[in-house]
Image: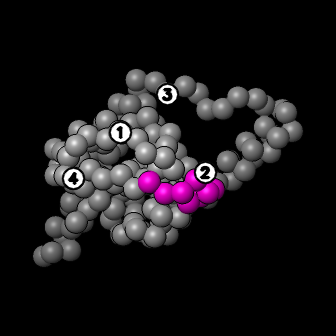
Amino acid sequence: MLNIYIDADACSVKSEVYRVAERYKLDVTLVANCWMRVPDESWITIEVVGGNLDEADDWIVEQVKPHDIVITADILLAGRCLKEEAYVIGPNGKSFDKDNIGDAVAMRSLMSELRDSGEITGGPPPFQKKDRSNFLQELDRVIQLIRREYSEFLK
């Protein structure tokens, strides 16, 4: 059964995932370092892991299966999940895949170096309505893609 995993501590599109998952009858697992309120639905679970660095990421990578979907802004986690043959979507609607993850990791490293040297300050741009719309479109597209792949596999 297809599952959607959410790297939940800083995820801004949880309610959107719930709506789409309910429509498609998919399970959702939120993974976080601390407890958070989630809707009382049998298909939504929360996994609270310890607060150690990368503990939530490690848990997701251990659980994810091919064709699952992971929602995360963490580029390194995205890369690890892609190795497990999962689909990965950022909250802004950008999907990560084997063709773009290398560039994303390199850009992450470059931006980190520039921030460390003081050449740039600040973080990513604020989340906007357009990001939410892009996310919903991409999540729907990926679910449809997976459904087509499964139907081809079952023939």
Residue nearest the viewer, comparing 114 with 64: 64
Image quadrant for the N terminus? bottom left
N-term-proximal mark, 4 vs 3: 4
Q: Is residue 51 magenta?
A: yes
Say if the magenta span includes residue 116: no
Instruction: Report which residue position mark 4 lands on.
Output: 43
Query: Which residue is found at the position 43% from the left and 45% from the top?
Result: 35
Query: Can residue 26 be seen in this snapshot?
Result: yes
- Using the image, tell me which numbered label, if any, was put on residue 123: none
Q: CA distance from mark 3 to mark 2?
A: 19 Å
Residue 20: quarter of image: top left
Left or right: 46 with respect to 40?
right
Q: CA distance from mark 1 to mark 3?
A: 21 Å
First in sequence: mark 2 or mark 4? 4
> Residue tagged by mark 1?
37
Secondary structure, magenta segment, majority class: loop
Boundaries of the magenta span? 48-55
Query: Amino acid type of disc 1?
Result: Arg
User: Could you give the CA–CA distance between mark 2 and mark 4, rounded to whole angstroms?
Assistant: 32 Å
Q: Earlier in the sequence, mark 1 or mark 4?
A: 1
Q: Residue at x 75, y 44 (%)?
A: 112
Residue with the mark numbered 2? 104
Residue positioned most to the left:
155
The amino acid type, in three-letter code, at marker 3 is Phe
How many C-alpha atoms fall within 10 Å of the one at disc 2: few (<14), some, or many (≥20)?
A: some
Image coordinates for residue 37, horizontal then vertical, percent: 35, 39
The amino acid type of the residue labelled 2 equals Ala
Check if mark 1's residue and mark 3's residue have beta carbons within 8 Å: no
Say which residue appears at 21% left-offset and 53% top-offset.
Answer: 43
